[in-house]
Structures are given as C-alpha cells and as structure tokens.
Image (spheres, rainbow, N blue to C red):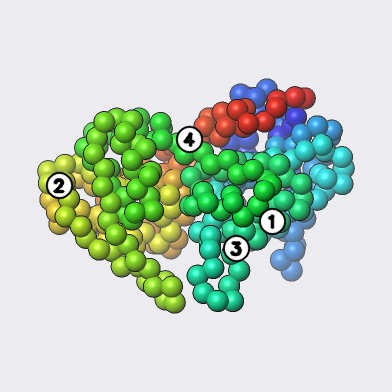
C-alpha cells in the first residue's frame, strides 16, 4: 500500500503516511500554456491511496486526478482509494431544472469507471449521493468530536444550523456536550440562486451561539444568520464550518458580524484551525484492509 499525493495535500498525506506506516510518493504535475495538464507518478504494485485537495481550481484538479487514475491503472496497481477531503460538485446532488445533469452522480460514475473502490471525504453536502452508484463506496467523515471539543473550549451555549439541511450536524455536536440546538429556514431561488433566510424565534438571548455548516462560499447565508441571531439577543456569534471556500470578499463580509470563524483544512486555507487528517486516517484504517 502506498500513498500518492498532490502537492496541495502534502500536509494531510504526510500525517496519514506516518500513522498508517506506508510509503509515500508525490505526484508530478504540469500545466501547459494552453490550459492542458499532465501528471506522472512512479507506480508500484498494491493498493494506491490517492490524496488531493480539489479546491481551488476544481476542474483542473479533477482532470489531474482522472489522468493519475488512468496512469496508475495502466501501470499495475491492484486497487485505488481516493482521499478527497472536499468532494466537489456534491451540492449538485439532484436535477434542479430540466436539461441539467446530476453532477455529483456524473463525478462518482467517472471514478467508478476507473476502478476506484472507496472515496473518503469530509462532511459531504448530502450523503444520499452514494445511492447513485454501487461502487465506489463513499465514506463520509464528520468531525463531530473535533467540533464538540472546540465548542466546549470556546464556551458555546447553543448550536444553530443556518438551514434544516445542516440540523443533523448541529445535533451531532450538541449531543456530545449536552447543549441545545436549533435551526433557521432557508429558501433558494433555483433560477437566480438568491438565498432567503426566514428568522425563527429561538431562545439565544445573552448566549454564545455557534453556527455550524458544511460549506461557506460567498458567506451570505452565514452573515444573514449571524445578524438574525444578534437581533434575537445573542451575546456572541461564531461559526464552525467544514469547507471554507471563502469566495471573493467572504471573509471580510463575515467579520462584519461574526466574533469568530473556525474552519477545517479540507481546502487550502491559511486560517484553518481544525485538522481533519486524523479522522480521515482512522476512517481509511477502519475500512481498508491494510496490506503492503
């Protein structure tokens, strides 16, 4: 068994290799002036664990990954496992309008074609996408223990989801430390993408509230939720977010209201404070027969 890693995931790969006691190979990457890409890796026998961050430059990174899968397959690896801390296109989990693809399904089918047995990812947007394919097996790692430890440390009194879709995330963390949880209602215009937040009455007056969500992109939803919580009397509002994409001026927008924003390192982020290497490694060890 050997870990093949892209440069943008070196930190995760190094820690995984140390825990799993397996070999480590960095993938050579090239990008040409016309936009094409090329990869190369010295392949050996046995199972290949491929580690890469897919954001930013999502489509380039996917193409590099597909080329690597094909190269490793051609050179005799016996099996391939993906460790993708952030799984792109997971939010496109269904057909929102006629004529659209189900992009999450498309991505999984592409990996299945290349004989990938497992995909390990962190806090996928909707776990139901695994039902689109029988293979590869999608293993979703939610760092509830890490979030609970953080929430306890910073004195969070209640956890709030910005929409009902993330309510399970809030509940999983709240149950670990014995605090309450609640949610807002969110509506998205499928044509324009505009998000509307419906404020619900909740008992947060004088409390330190943590918003918990899987993804922050432009920051608009979390900013609206923060302002709503402050209007309801919350003393302090922080956010715990798995994938901090932080598009454009998202960070600056959030700090207009937030008292703190805590991110994992599933994507490249200099402000990341929660490491996901250990829970990902534990998931690999629990699901993959560890042979040379």
Badge 1: few (under 14), some or many (20 or more) residues near its Cα, within 10 Å? some
**Mark 4 highlights which residue?**
275
The quarter holding residue 251 reads: bottom left
Question: Could you give the CA–CA distance between mark 1 and mark 4, rounded to whole angstroms?
Answer: 29 Å
Sequence-first disc among 2 and 4: 2
Report whether 169 appears left or right of 116. left
Query: Could you tell me if the residues under marks 2 and 4 are in contact, i.e. CB atoms within 8 Å?
Result: no
Query: Could you tell me if the residues under marks 3 and 4 are in contact, i.e. CB atoms within 8 Å?
Result: no
Question: Could you give the CA–CA distance between mark 1 and mark 3, rounded to whole angstroms?
Answer: 10 Å
Front one among 127 and 199: 127
Question: Could you give the CA–CA distance between mark 3 and mark 2, rounded to whole angstroms?
Answer: 39 Å
**Mark 3 highlights which residue?**
103
- Secondary-structure class at tag 4: loop
**Mark 1 highlights which residue?**
109
> On the rendered image, what quadrant is the N terminus found in?
top right
**Mark 2 highlights which residue?**
203
Sequence-first disc among 2 and 1: 1
Question: Could you give the CA–CA distance between mark 3 and mark 4, rounded to whole angstroms?
Answer: 28 Å
Image height of 41 relative to 90, above or below: above
Q: Residue 85: horizontal and vertical position, in percent?
A: 56, 44
Question: Which of label 1 and label 4 is nearer to you?
Answer: 1
Report whether 241 appears left or right of 209. right
């Amino acid at each position: 068994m050997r870990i093949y890693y892209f440069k943008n995931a070196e930190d995760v790969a190094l820690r995984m290799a140390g825990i799993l006691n397996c070999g480590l190979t960095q993938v050579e990457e090239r990008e040409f002036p016309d936009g094409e890409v090329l990869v190369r890796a010295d392949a050996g026998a046995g199972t290949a664990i491929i580690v890469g961050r897919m954001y930013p430059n999502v489509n380039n990174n996917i193409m590099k990954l597909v080329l690597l899968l094909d190269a490793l397959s051609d050179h005799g690896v016996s099996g391939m496992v993906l460790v993708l801390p952030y799984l792109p296109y997971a939010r496109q989990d269904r057909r929102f309008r006629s004529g659209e693809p189900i992009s999450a399904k498309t991505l999984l089918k592409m990996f299945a074609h290349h004989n990938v047995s497992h995909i390990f990812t962190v806090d996928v947007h909707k776990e139901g996408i695994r039902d689109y394919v029988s293979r590869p097996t999608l293993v979703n790692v939610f760092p509830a223990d890490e979030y609970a430890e953080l929430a306890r440390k910073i004195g969070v009194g209640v956890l709030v989801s910005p929409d009902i879709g993330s309510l399970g995330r809030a509940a999983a963390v709240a149950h670990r430390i014995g605090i309450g949880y609640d949610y807002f209602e969110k509506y998205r215009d499928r044509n324009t993408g505009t998000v509307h937040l419906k404020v619900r009455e909740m008992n947060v007056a004088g409390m330190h509230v943590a918003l918990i969500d899987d993804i922050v992109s432009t920051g608009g939803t979390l900013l609206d939720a923060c302002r709503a919580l402050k209007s309801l009397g919350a003393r302090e509002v922080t956010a715990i977010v798995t994938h901090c994409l932080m598009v454009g001026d998202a960070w600056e927008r959030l700090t207009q209201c937030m008292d703190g924003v805590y991110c994992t390192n599933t994507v490249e982020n200099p402000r990341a404070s929660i490491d996901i290497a250990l829970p990902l490694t534990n998931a690999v060890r629990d699901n993959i027969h560890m042979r040379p």
